[in-house]
Amino acid sequence: MFKTFKLPRLIATGALSLALAMGAVAPTPAQADDNFRNFALGAAGIIVLGTILNEQQRRQGNYGHVNRAPQRQHVAPQRPHRAAVLPARCIRGHGRNGYVAAPCLRHSGYRVNALPNQCRVQVRGGPNGFGLGCLRRSGYQFG
């Protein structure tokens, strides 16, 4: 479609074009009047045409293509088909630092490799395990 221009920019462009045209062409005074009149009529026609097209696009609500950033899709965490209940006695720590100790889960008969890998945590000074909040968000319960 047509590119829209703001009217002040269009007027400034027309004035600059007029100044350049008049400075580059140094005709005789009689010719200058005819050339100036023709140029002024042409510039006025372009301004009127641009204004009409801009007004038409404004009425139609067509302001051209707008690139928008893609919207992030919310992806729900994958949950097991049936909620697995992990032993509460394996919970170590509390709050944001809470985790479930992997050796305790193994000793209780749970397959540690079946738990979500993204929940795995390294614990300094203790056994490795799985983040408590991450396991809850993944659908696991404690009992």
Image (tube, helix red, strand yellow):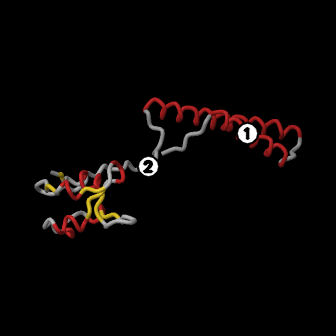
Labels 1 and 2 touching (C-beta < 8 A): no
Q: Return the residue nearer the eye: 101 or 74.
A: 101
Q: Which residue is mark 2?
A: 69
Above or below, 70 against 15 in this view is below
Q: How many marks?
A: 2
**Between 1 and 89, the one nearer to me in the picture:** 89
Q: x%, y% of residue 36?
A: 78, 37
Judged from the image, the secondary structure of the residue bearing numbered disc 2 is: loop
Give me the disc on residue 39.
1
Q: Mark 1 or 2, which is nearer the eye?
A: 2
**Which numbered marker is on residue 67?**
none
Query: How far apart in space, not on screen, are marks 1 and 2 (Cα)?
Result: 44 Å
Q: Earlier in the sequence, mark 1 or mark 2?
A: 1
Quadrant of residue 131 in the image? bottom left
Q: Seen in the image, is 75 located left or right of residue 19?
A: left
Query: Which residue is drawn at the image coordinates 21% and 70% (left, top)?
Result: 113
Q: Position of residue 29 (x, y in %)?
A: 88, 38
Structural crowding at the residue carrying mark 1, measured as other residues with C-alpha within 10 Å and reported as few (<14), some (14–19) or many (≥20): some
Q: Quadrant of residue 99?
A: bottom left
Q: Secondary structure at mark 1?
A: helix
Q: Amino acid at mark 1?
A: Phe
- Residue drawn at 28 percent across, 61 percent down: 130
125 horizontally vs 24: left or right: left
Question: Which sits in the foreground, 58 or 30?
Answer: 58
Position in image of residue 12 (x %, y %): 72, 37
Q: Position of residue 28 (x, y in %)?
A: 89, 42
